Image (cartoon, rainbow, N blue to C red):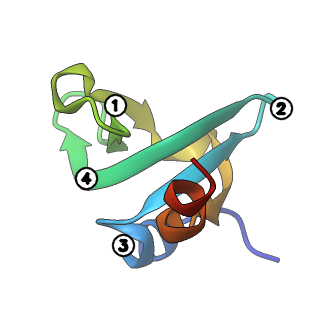
Amino acid sequence: MEGFSINTAKSFLGRNVNLHLKDGSVIINVLLAEIQKDEFREKALIKCVPYGRRKNAFKIPLKSIAWAELLNLNLISAGG
C-alpha cells in the first residue's frame, strides 16, 4: 500500500474523514477542504475543517498523514 499522496488527498476533497497520522494519533471527523502549497517550504498542506465549525479550520502537512478513513455522515446523524 502506498502512502497518503496528493492524488489520494484529491479523491477525499469535500468529504468527511478521520485522519490517521504517522505519529499514531487520529484527527476525527474533519472535512478536507482544499490542498494548498506552502510557497516558502514547497510542502503540500491539507486544509481541514472540523465538523460543524467553519471558523476553526487548520492546516496539516500532507507528509504527516498516514491514511484517511472515509466517514458516512448519514449513519452518524441517524444514531443521534
Res. 48 mark: none
Count of picture labels: 4
Res. 10 mark: 3
Q: Secondary structure at mark 3?
A: helix
Q: Secondary structure at mark 2?
A: loop
Q: Which residue is mark 4?
A: 33
For residue 27, side relative to residue 66 (left or right) = left
Amino acid type for the residue under numbered disc 3: Lys
Amino acid type for the residue under numbered disc 2: Gly
Residue 59, position as x, y percentages in the image: 34, 31
Q: CA distance from mark 4 to mark 3?
A: 10 Å
Q: Which residue is mark 2?
A: 24
Other-residue count near label 4 (Cα within 10 Å), few / some / many at <14 / 14–19 / ≥20: some
Q: CA distance from mark 1 to mark 4?
A: 10 Å
Residue 73, position as x, y percentages in the image: 49, 63
- Front one among 31 and 21: 31
> Between disc 1 and disc 4, whose residue precedes?
4
Q: Secondary structure at mark 4?
A: strand
Q: CA distance from mark 2 to mark 3?
A: 23 Å
For residue 43, side relative to residue 57 (left or right) = right
Amino acid type for the residue under numbered disc 4: Ala
Q: CA distance from mark 2 to mark 1?
A: 18 Å
Other-residue count near label 3 (Cα within 10 Å), few / some / many at <14 / 14–19 / ≥20: some
Other-residue count near label 1 (Cα within 10 Å), few / some / many at <14 / 14–19 / ≥20: some
Amino acid type for the residue under numbered disc 1: Lys
For residue 48, side relative to residue 5 (left or right) = left
Q: Which residue is mark 1?
A: 59
